[in-house]
Image (tube, helix red, strand yellow):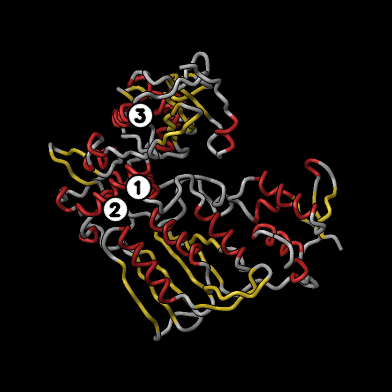
């Protein structure tokens, strides 16, 4: 088969990591494992299997199942086991590539046969001793989720939940022939939810929290306490409910509680009055998922609290912000206290491994004419507060003028923003819609210029837009 030239730009256009690496299908297991460990020890990246590393030409993968198995075994051979998103298949022309993503900010230092590597450009090389000591100090702690209670067994896991997860795992990898792939127990081992201790397979705390029949037997405070109060503060009149079981069951219970206790209101959304929930459901859901994924489960003095008051909603989780995360960089920095839990939740579709949940909550609040969430860290806890009081309508801004135009929700956000400010820049527009590619936002603003709504002023980095009077 004639091999087409490798074109990197369509891949970058999909929003994938710019740190790209590639191997031919016949890459040796040890070389693949060393590269994956090196990427994890550096800053992550994306690795393609099915490309000639010398010529850069696409050869494709002839046997996807065999390639997946090789990646599976490479991850298992690192110490500790490397937990990454399910590799996916990318078709380029008439051939298929296997795409492997290694997230940045993983909390371990990953070794292979007693050696530690990192990446310099396209090379996998040993980590210098001084750098290795620095990495071990920064990330070499034993994570609580990777440990196991002394008396837990594999039978303490719910087989129904495990099988449901296995199906989601296979679906994410687009595998139809399940019988030829690793069994559910092997997947739990690869994901770090199951480990061999003294000759027996025992769940880790992560496995117990994700798939346990009753994880509160070992972690009594691993639950969500939900309450709706009638006033602005804690009082005698309230509706209360406890969510126990696995964290998947807790998420489902919390969603049910929210649907029953978040009220409907009429609010100006964009250009029209609409009946909506007092808090956008997707924003609150993101906050709860974030709390479950990132709370400190080693702190057993308290649970996650979901409190709904008449004027605000609060989600409070035990433990301060993890690693290098601060209030100032919380929307941009990426670090996970519980990488196994985060990855399994990502496999199940609850979170994105890239970690943009809080960004989506901010965007959702703004799109619903509400102020962005408030973040607070104090006394060993982290709290996010949503207020249900809408932002003030833009003064002297008659939004009905634009009803006849085909304007999308992002453009409505820009026009609302200009109702209180003289101008908007590309950067300010991206802050309103952080999940959207900058080029898409640039086209939105250009479209408003072509429709006679905005005037473009300046050029390149000094460009900004104002309303046309």
Judged from the image, the secondary structure of the residue bearing numbered disc 1 is helix
User: Which residue is located at x 72 percent, y 49 percent?
Assistant: 426
Closest to the observer, 413 or 42: 413
Q: Where does the image place residue 330, in percent across and percent down from the top left?
A: 54, 52
CB-based contact (under 8 Å), mark 1 and mark 2: yes
Location of residue 456 with respect to 199 vertically, above or below: below
Confirm whether residue 445 shows in the render: yes
CB-based contact (under 8 Å), mark 1 and mark 3: no
User: Which residue is located at x 49 percent, y 62 percent?
Assistant: 282
Q: Where does the image place residue 277, in percent across and percent down from the top left?
A: 52, 73
Q: Where does the image place residue 217, in percent across and percent down from the top left?
A: 20, 60
List the single residue furthest toward the top.
Answer: 54
Q: Quadrant of the image for the N terminus?
A: top left
User: How far is mark 2 from mark 3, CA to CA?
Assistant: 29 Å
Q: Where does the image place residue 327, in percent across and percent down from the top left?
A: 55, 54
Location of residue 189 with respect to 160 vertically, above or below: above
Residue 210: mark = 2
User: How far is mark 1 from mark 3, CA to CA?
Assistant: 22 Å
Q: Is residue 147 left or right of residue 410?
A: left
The crowd level at tag 1 (other Cα within 10 Å; few <14, some 14-19, many 20+) is: many
List the single residue furthest toward the right.
Answer: 469
Q: Is residue 408 left or right of residue 3?
A: right
Please tell me in which quadrant of the rendered image residue 15 appears.
Answer: top right
Please tell me in which quadrant of the rendered image residue 179 appears.
Answer: top left
User: How far is mark 1 from mark 2, CA to CA?
Assistant: 8 Å
Location of residue 319 with respect to 50 vertically, above or below: below
Which residue in the protein does label 3 denote?
Answer: 64
Closest to the observer, 345 or 341: 345
The crowd level at tag 2 (other Cα within 10 Å; few <14, some 14-19, many 20+) is: many
Which residue in the protein does label 1 denote?
Answer: 344
Judged from the image, the secondary structure of the residue bearing numbered disc 3 is helix
Closest to the observer, 272 or 45: 272
């Amino acid at each position: 088969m004639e091999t087409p030239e490798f074109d990197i730009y369509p891949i970058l256009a999909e929003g994938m990591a710019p740190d790209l690496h590639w191997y031919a299908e016949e890459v040796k297991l040890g070389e693949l494992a060393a590269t994956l460990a090196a990427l994890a020890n550096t800053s992550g990246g994306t690795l393609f299997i099915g490309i000639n590393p010398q010529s850069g030409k696409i050869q494709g993968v002839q046997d996807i199942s065999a390639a997946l198995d090789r990646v599976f075994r490479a991850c298992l051979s690192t110490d500790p086991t490397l937990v990454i998103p399910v590799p996916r298949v990318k078709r380029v022309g008439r051939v298929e590539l296997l795409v492997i993503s290694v997230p940045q900010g993983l909390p371990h230092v990953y070794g292979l046969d007693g050696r530690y590597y990192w990446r310099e450009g396209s090379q996998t090389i040993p980590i210098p001793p001084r750098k290795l000591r620095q990495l071990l100090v920064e990330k070499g702690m034993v994570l609580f989720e990777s440990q196991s209670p002394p008396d837990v067994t594999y039978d303490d896991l719910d087989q129904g939940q495990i099988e449901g997860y296995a199906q989601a795992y296979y679906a994410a990898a687009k595998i139809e022939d399940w019988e030829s792939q690793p069994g559910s127990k092997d997947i739990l081992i690869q994901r770090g939810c199951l480990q061999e201790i003294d000759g027996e397979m025992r769940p880790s705390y992560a496995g117990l929290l994700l798939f346990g029949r009753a994880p509160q037997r070992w972690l009594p405070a691993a639950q969500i306490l939900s309450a709706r109060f009638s006033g602005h503060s804690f009082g005698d009149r309230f509706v209360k409910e406890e969510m126990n079981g696995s964290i998947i069951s807790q998420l489902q219970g919390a969603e049910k509680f929210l649907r029953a206790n978040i009220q409907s209101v009429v609010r100006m959304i964009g250009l029209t009055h609409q009946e909506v929930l007092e808090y956008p459901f997707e924003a609150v859901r993101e906050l709860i998922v974030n709390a479950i994924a990132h709370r400190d489960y080693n702190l057993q003095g308290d649970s996650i609290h979901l409190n709904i008051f008449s004027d605000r909603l609060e989600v409070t989780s035990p433990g301060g912000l993890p690693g290098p995360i601060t209030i100032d960089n919380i929307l941009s920095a990426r670090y996970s206290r519980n990488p196994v839990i985060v990855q399994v939740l990502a496999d199940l579709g609850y979170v994105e491994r890239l970690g943009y949940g809080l960004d989506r909550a901010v965007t959702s609040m703004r799109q619903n004419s509400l102020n962005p969430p408030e973040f607070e860290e104090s006394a060993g806890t982290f709290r996010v507060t949503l207020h249900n009081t809408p932002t003030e309508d833009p003064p002297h801004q008659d939004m009905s003028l634009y009803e006849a135009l085909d304007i999308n929700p992002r453009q409505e956000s820009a026009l609302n923003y200009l109702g209180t400010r003289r101008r908007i820049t590309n950067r300010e527009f991206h802050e309103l819609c952080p999940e959207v590619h900058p080029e898409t936002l640039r086209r939105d603003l250009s479209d408003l210029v072509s429709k006679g709504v905005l005037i473009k002023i300046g050029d390149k980095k000094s460009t900004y837009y104002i309303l046309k009077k």
